[in-house]
Amino acid sequence: MKKIKVVQIGCGNMAKMTVSYALEKGAQIVGAVDNRPEIIGRDLGEVLGYDKKLGVTVSGDLAATLDTAYGDEKPNAQGKYNKFAIVTTTSLVNEVGATLKECARRGINTYTTCEEAHYPWLSAVTMAKEIDALAKEHGATITGGGYQDVFWGHEIVTLAGACHQITKIHGESRYNVDHYGIALALIHGAGFTTAEFEEKVAAPSRKTFQEFLVGMDEGTIEPGYSWTVNGWLAARLGLTIIDQVQECIPTFSPIDLYSSTLGRTIKAGDATGMINRATTKTAEGVEIVFDSIGSVYSPDDTDFNNWKIYGVPDCNVVNAEPATPEHTCATVVNRLIDLYAAPAGYITTNQLPPARYFASADSYVIEG
């Protein structure tokens, strides 16, 4: 049995947790990559604010790091390598696609927190197919998600398994955009004036299903988190989508709010973020509605994740104040072992068993 070898790509807030969790599970961090000049050349432990150095220097050269970090690893009987990467950089597949391709062509099993990567088959289809082809050719498994893997995915599917009939699935989930970095905050329109939000976020989302499919694949329309979640749920539940639309609704605060991610105060009346609502109709008659609510929080705001299934019988689940960033990072680390056993290709997590817990470093291993 072997400890897994991991390269961390993106050395910001999320990496502080993914690296810590991976080390505690017994993984070897063999490389780190970031594009910020001020941290390139520094020790990863120092960059992440740990109380000790890790002996891993942050590099600005992705290709060189991936070529050398793992040593001379040989494939197993299934053609899989002890090569893993965690990618915590951007939120859109067309932005992270080049990085995922670099991993795929080197046989590196990769999990990205890119939200669209959770289920890109209704948005970034062209890029996902390119990544899939490279991954299959070189024996790599690529996937994405994090929090949504469990709390917007497998948890809901398990709940559905206790129903005889289902007519509608409705979810609402709220999270603090200040926890996830500048790219996510801007996608949510945080800090935009009402006019800016309408022009840059809301108006582009008033489209038909076919217009969404084409525009998202071309990169002219950005999918919200709800869009990918509904597609994932439909696929996992064996439902056939006949129509899907998304709305972007701004959120506001009656008081000025400081955003640590934006580095400035959002004035009352400007957008603090948005509700991204996806509504999906299926041939089987099941409707899926999901409100993903991301905003800069006021002192009294908290995370929540609530889902209700309407059917025979009705049922619901309430996750009060989930530790969303921590759950995201724990899921990423726990999932790496699954990638080693999964087929090569772009394998979205609806095709994987539910994420599992590893009680000790002795169990967090792969077969040699």
Image (cartoon, rainbow, N blue to C red):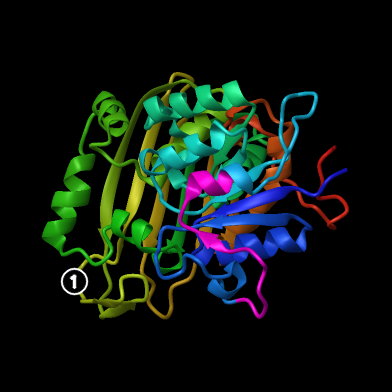
User: Residue 266's spot in the image, x, y percent?
Assistant: 24, 74
Please check the rendered image and state whether residue 65 is part of the magenta-colored stretch, yes or no: yes
Relative to 285, residue 120 above or below: below
Is residue 289 something that shows in the picture? no
Name the amino acid type tagged 1: Gly
The residue nearer to you, when weighing 23 against 355, is 23
Q: From the viewer's side, name the closer residue of 284 and 185.
A: 185
> Where 303 falls versus 259 (above or below)?
above
- For image coordinates 29% across by 67% down, the residue present is 272
Q: Is residue 332 above or below residue 266?
A: above
> Residue tagged by mark 1?
269
Residue range (magenta): 50-66
Q: Position of residue 319 (x, y in %)?
A: 59, 59
Horizontal and vertical percent position of residue 241: 42, 23
Q: Could one spot residue 221 in this view of the protein?
A: yes
Looking at the image, residue 132 sits to the left or right of residue 198; the answer is right
Q: Quadrant of the C terminus?
A: top right
**Element on which disc 1 rests:** loop
